Amino acid sequence: MKIFLGDTEATLRLGITLGESLSPSSVILLEGDLGAGKTTLVQGIGKGLGITEPIVSPTFTLINEYTEGRFPLYHLDLYRLEPQEVAALNLESYWEGVEVIPGIVAVEWAKRMPYKPDSYLSVSLTYEEDGTRQAEIIPFNCAIAAI
Ligand code: ADP
Ligand code: MG
């Protein structure tokens, strides 16, 4: 499914819809170049979960956890990592809920992952020549009834 995103607000609104409708243990794997709107989409997801704390890019912190919403948001950015470094992080504990409260896991630069969860939502953001963006959403073994 392709969605036209005419401005920053549109990207935020798509994120809000996802944040309002996804269940805990959902994984969103985000693709798209620098500036495509990945962090903006996750900011919307946070709003949809009822998180009021500002959501900032985890490019340097690797992972930011927000726990004040309906359920947690785990926001990762793998841009600076090699796939073998990603493997060492044991990210599966997030989506398997092992010693972690189940929440939404949103991963920027997901192509750095050497393995993926059994079910996830793939969201690819592309930068158009006129500055607008497009999102292509593909569910893998999961439903997205709300969009
Ligand atoms: P990324 O995390 O993919 O690097 P960001 O979410 O940081 O990208 O967004 C980069 C810039 O693009 C921000 O200034 C944001 O406001 C803007 N932006 C996000 N979505 C859109 C859109 N649909 N149209 C135009 N600008 C957008
Ligand atoms: Mg980003």
Image: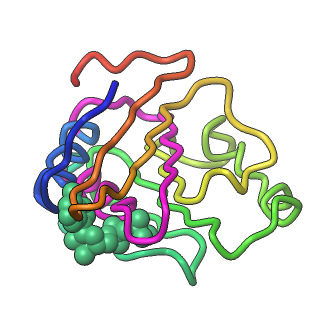
| Placement of 92 over or under 21, stated as above or below | below
Residue in the image at 88% along x and 61% along y: 84
Residue in the image at 25% along x and 47% along y: 15
Residue 55 in sight in this render: no
Q: Quadrant of the C terminus?
A: top left
Q: Position of residue 130 (x, y in %)?
A: 21, 62
Residue in the image at 45% along x and 44% along y: 124
State which region is magenta. 20-47
Q: Is residue 23 left or right of residue 26?
A: left
Residue 43 in sight in this render: yes
| Residue 43 in magenta stretch | yes
Identify the colour scheme used.
rainbow
Q: Which quarter holds ligand 1?
A: bottom left
Q: Is residue 108 left or right of residue 12?
A: right
Residue in the image at 48% along x and 41% along y: 28
Residue lying farthest bottom?
A: 60
| Residue 34 in magenta stretch | yes
Q: Position of residue 23 (x, y in %)?
A: 37, 29
| Placement of 121 over or under 87, stated as above or below | above
Q: Quadrant of the N terminus?
A: top left
Residue 95 figure quarter:
top right
Residue 39 figure quarter:
bottom left
Q: Is residue 122 left or right of residue 62?
A: left
Residue lying farthest front?
A: 129
Residue situated in front as seen by the camera: 58 or 79: 79
Residue 37 figure quarter:
bottom left
